[in-house]
Amino acid sequence: MGDAQPPRPAPDERFAPVFGAAAFEGDPPGAVSSRAGHFLSMGTAAFGSPEQTADVRDDAEALGVPFVVPATEGDLLWSDQSNLDRLTRFALQDHGASDARDWQGGAPPRADDELALWHNVELTHSVPSLLALLNHARGSEHELERVAAAAALRAFSNGALEAADEVLAAATTSADEHVAAIANTALRRSDGGGTEPAQPTRSPTGGSAPTTFAAAEVSLAIHGTWAQVTADPWYAPGEPLHRHIRAVSTPNLYDESDYYTWSGGHSQFARDVGSAELPIWRNALTLPPFDTVFAHSHGGNVALTAAANGERIRMLVLMHTPALPRPDEQWEAIRAHVGRTVVMRTRLDHVVLADGLVNGSSQRFDQNRLPHHPVVLHWANPDAWFSHSFFTELGSWLKYDLAGTVIRQHRYVEQLV
């Protein structure tokens, strides 16, 4: 008899999708997350690029999100708060379920009114209909919902709507890490509420970097933005996921206390500095080339830029990484220096969508620019949606044998060298 396996984790009910109009008909946690997914994906369609709109379309349609036409210069009339409040009041009077003549911006929305405004977007596909819904929702009693609505409003108005920015500013220090990440992303906060770079949090499990693989390469885990303010330093030696990856799929995963970190700042400058420091760190420790790099969120872009600058990575595992726009010559250099890429993502990841509204990033990588093996659960799976941390959780790796995926993909790349 082998060792008993831990029970399979149940889907996180907070991120369980509620499809279509039903998301606006109740307040279970999954419905609130689904409404946030509606606001961010409709905001992407209305205020993002054609490429971003195409990127979210399949997932948005699976969730039952109405399509919205791209915003035009004429829609900027509504970037004045008094005009937007008047638009919202008219929309409520025409389509709402209650008398809204006395409605004031920021007032808690009535569920019937919110559903009516959503149906109006479904009917008209227009930006004004969407803006009325978002402005109405920024008064929600649910922090996640009002922050998602405010993030979309900020993207539309480029910060001109102060009421939306007030919602976001209040949420930057939220006790809910997911909400705080959306707010800090939308406001382009570089520090995420923290001041110090990530530091080792536990003692390593011991031993120098193993040399099991024939090329004596070393593997590495790279954290994402604001790692210093997260409760789960998954990337640190001694942490459960780090131990699991090292034990099951990647025995050469770096396991010393001087492991690599970067500032975690939410800026291109911070990511570029982190990319430049990666080979410096490796050379300072006289480490061999990288075998497998596991990178979360914008830590993936740190690794990609390092590869574009010449750092060789046999296999890159990207978890919840926003696909930033890059010139073709960068993608060509990345393809030349990365042997194989695995992309793990959730559908309509709230934080990645918020990043897209400020950075022009997408949730998916173009197979022509970065050939990769995608790891995405089927849309009907309750685990498939919204989370920005699903693939950094040990329970997810155990439940879906993600270490097995790493092993299998590594075998493919071994044939290329």
Image: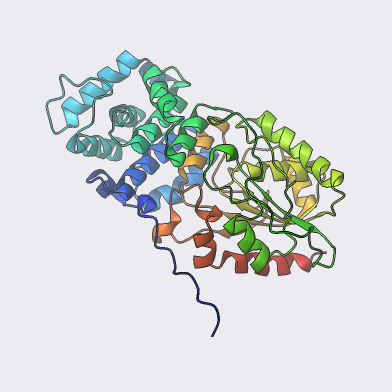
Q: Is residue 290 above or below residue 152?
A: below
Outermost residue on the left side: it is 99
Q: Position of residue 198 (x, y in %)?
A: 64, 39
Q: How is the image coloured?
A: rainbow
Q: Quadrant of the N terminus?
A: bottom right
**Residue at (73, 47) in percent of width and height:** 259
Q: Is residue 20 left or right of residue 286?
A: left
Q: Would residue 313 appear left or right of 238 to someone viewing this image? A: right
Q: Give how far across and how far down residue 150 sits, in percent.
A: 39, 29
Give the residue at x 28% y 34%: 141
Side of 335 where 243 appears, left or right: left
Q: Residue at x 79, y 65 (%)?
A: 416
Return the x and y of residue 225 as percentages of the image width and height.
Answer: 59, 38
State how many labels appear.
0
Residue 225 visible in this rendered orientation of the protein: no
Quarter of the view holding residue 135: top left
**Residue 275 sits above or below residue 394 on the image:** above
Q: In what quadrant of the picture does the C terminus appear?
A: bottom right
Q: Which residue lies at the image location 54% right of the left edge and 48% below the top edge? A: 232
* Residue 274 in view of the camera: yes
* Vertical comparison of 301 with 6: above or below: above
Question: In the current view of this chain or complex, which residue is farthest to the bottom?
Answer: 1
The x, y position of residue 283, in whole percent, is: 86, 45
Position of 113 with respect to 301 (left or right) is left
